[in-house]
């Protein structure tokens, strides 16, 4: 199945899983916990608060050479949004692609996704691990984001 067929297939609607595809077109599903959604929401809120000239949005499908990968949160400039907003999957990655690590994810999987996002023209890829934010550009790990320098390195929730 291609990504558009997956999006339209009635039996794949309203599943409590994040769906992606691999390079063979096989469907990959990952279940997420509430904390995962809380981190996604907080990251999206902070991006909206800190950055202008673009949009933050969740669950962004990105076409890669190894299938469709879905960034948990993405931020794209207005110019890039004009290109991707009517696409089924992004032909070009948003400038920032963010993954929130789940129990089912591995570091190798995250490293591969990071490489695939950069190949698809992402400028930065962030990884959220238990609230700690790790920033990467195409050269490797960086201390802070150059696109969102005020973004915190740790996200916490008041109990």
Image (cartoon, grey):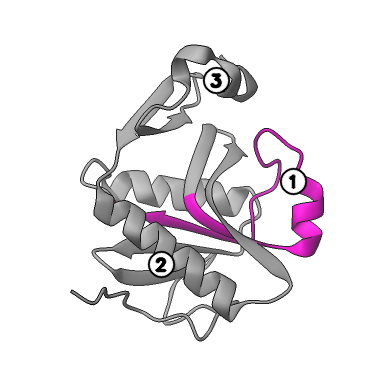
Q: Earlier in the sequence, mark 2 or mark 3?
A: 3
Mark 3 lies on residue: 6
Pair 2/3: label in front: 2
What segment is highlighted magenta in the picture?
Answer: 72-101
| Residue at the (35%, 33%) spot, across then down | 17
83 displayed left or right of 34: right
Secondary structure of the residue carrying tag 1 is: helix
Residue at image location 81% in from the left, 52% down from the top = 82
Marked residue nearer the N-terminal end (2 or 1): 2
**Would you call the spot at circle 3 few (<14 residues within 10 Å), some (14-19), or many (20 or more)?**
some
Q: Position of residue 33 (x, y in %)?
A: 24, 46
Q: Position of residue 137 (x, y in %)?
A: 53, 68
Q: CA distance from mark 1 to mark 3?
A: 18 Å
- Depth check, front residue: 14 or 17: 14
Whether residue 2 is visible, yes or no, is no
What residue did someone put label 1 on?
A: 84
- Left or right, 45 with respect to 102, comes to right
Q: CA distance from mark 2 to mark 3?
A: 28 Å
Residue with the mark numbered 2? 42
The C terminus lies in which quarter of the figure? bottom left
The answer to whether 123 is drawn above or below residue 117 in the figure is below
Location of residue 157 (image quadrant): bottom left
């Amino acid at each position: 199945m291609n990504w558009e067929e997956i999006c339209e297939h009635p039996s794949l609607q309203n599943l409590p899983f994040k769906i992606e595809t691999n390079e063979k077109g096989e469907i990959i599903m990952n279940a997420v916990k509430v904390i995962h959604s809380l981190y996604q929401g907080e990251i999206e809120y902070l991006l909206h608060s800190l950055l202008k000239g673009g949009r933050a949005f969740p669950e962004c499908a990105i076409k890669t050479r190894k299938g469709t990968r879905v960034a948990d949160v993405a931020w794209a400039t207005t110019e890039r949004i004009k290109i991707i907003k009517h696409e089924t999957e992004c032909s070009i990655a948003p400038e920032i692609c963010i993954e929130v690590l789940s129990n089912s994810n591995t570091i190798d999987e995250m490293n591969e996704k990071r490489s695939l996002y950069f190949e698809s023209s992402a400028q930065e890829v962030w990884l959220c691990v238990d609230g700690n934010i790790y920033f990467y550009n195409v050269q490797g790990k960086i201390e802070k984001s150059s696109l969102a320098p005020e973004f915190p390195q740790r996200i916490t929730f008041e109990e």
